[in-house]
Amino acid sequence: MPAIALTAADRARLRKTHPELFTSSIVKRWGGLMLLAGALAYLIYCWSFFDVGQKLAEGKWERASVYMADWISWEAQPRYRFQPDGALEIEHQRFSPLGENPDPDWMTTLPDGREEVTFGDHSNRIEIATNGVVAVLGGVPYDIAFANEAAILPDNAPAAMSEKNGRVTVEYGFAGSAEIRATQVLVRRRFLGWENFWFDTTSPFWGMSVSELWTSVTAGPQISPDQSNLSLAWNEFLTNSEWQHGDVLNKLLQTIVMAFVGTLFAATLAFPLAFIAARNVTNSKPLNWAAKRFFDFTRSVDMLIWALVFTRGFGPGPLAGIAAIFVTDTGTFGKLYSEAIENIDDKQREGVRSVGASTADVNRFGVVPQIAPVVISQTLYFWEANIRGATIIGAVGAGGIGLKLLEAMRTNQDWENVAYMVLLILIVVFVFDSLSNALRSRLIGPTGH
């Protein structure tokens, strides 16, 4: 089809009748670029206002690798003290993971009386004597002498050796380190894994291999006259003093119960109140306004704040956590449910009302079937989310595993215990996410159908 050329008069007429086609506002022409420039300017402002550059420069990034290593490993910390008579005294930390009278193969006494600690293989070791220390790195020995009550850094010291305040530190990578002073040597020997996870050093099952443990609980001689070896092993596992499995599992169960009960109570109260807040169901503006303001008040205060309030009122424990979830979710559920009611198709209500049904029956058969998918889906989602939320509010005294997690963090040493509890939380969230999706699919059908 041949193109039609417009005359000047046609163009003038079109411009007059449809000016929006020929001229566009600045916002339409440059809106995207302006938005991008505004976002970039805001990021620059935030960078300057919060002094991000300096914070990044001052960050102690070396601690990150240490913390990450602590999540997946454990340390033994023998301390070699130099006695006035020239002898060496070996001390182990309190509640040593090596048990009583430890004699690991990486700690040996040399024929001349010096003590030797190996870090992995023999090319990385430290030889300790009261008159000096020899640190061997990659097979190369470095003599560390003492003078004026201080350890002296060798002149040819590599980057793995450093000195501060009369203390020489030798880094052996993941395998550990040694801090050398004129009076003592502190060894930090690191091993991959979680020490004494199944049984602590006081347990009769401590140090057993899997096969030895199986033989003991199935066919071994009875250890305790009051219970079987299997029952004793289970009890020893739960009462492990280093990992406290029984207490951790109990706190985890408290967190799950807090989330379930708080969500259930909130949904139970919010559901009838939502009908009062819905303008198309309750024709009373004062009641609508009061119900909606009640929802706004309860949900506008964060769950963490409510947890602090109820902790002061009820004391530390799961009751404060349940109350915090209950109050916060009542407002959230009320808003979601009332908005779902206000968006229903009134034809179903009219049809039920036309047969002479009561107000309760009109709501039961004309409203509830329409909002049921939204109510069920949102309630299940918040139930799943509240399991994570219950962990956070537990850290402020509301009970559950959150408080246990905070206690482990405060020690700044039990990071493997922190990793253990975080892993349990992840497993629980995954399980309840899958359960929530299964219930949602069973009750309202798979998504997209």
Image: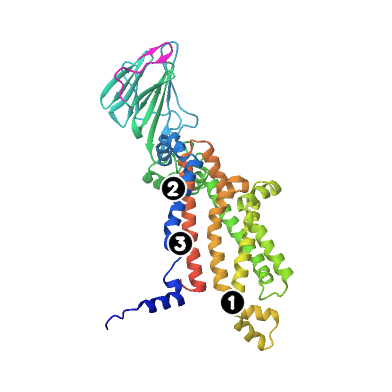
Q: Magenta stretch: give its range.
A: 145-158
Work out whether residue 171 can be spotted.
yes
Image quadrant of residue 282? Answer: bottom right
Instruction: Name the residue tied to disc 2.
Output: 217
Secondary structure under the numbered disc 1 in the rendered image:
loop
Which residue is nearer to you in this view: 179 or 368?
Answer: 368
- Upstream in sequence: badge 1 or badge 2: 2
Tell me if label 1 and label 2 are in contact, CB under 8 Å.
no
Element at badge 3? helix
Residue 324 in the image: state x and y as whole percent: 64, 54
Q: Quadrant of residue 192?
A: top left
* Spot occupied by residue 74 in the image (x, y as percentages of width and height): 42, 37
| Picture residue at 32% right of the left edge, 17% below the top | 154
Quarter of the figure with the N terminus:
bottom left
Left or right, residue 22 beside residue 319:
left
User: According to the image, label 3 marks what residue?
Assistant: 26
Q: CA distance from mark 1 to mark 2?
A: 63 Å
Q: Residue furthest left?
A: 139
Q: Residues within 10 Å of mark 2 (few under 14, many from 20)?
A: some
Q: Which residue is the site of mark 1?
A: 344
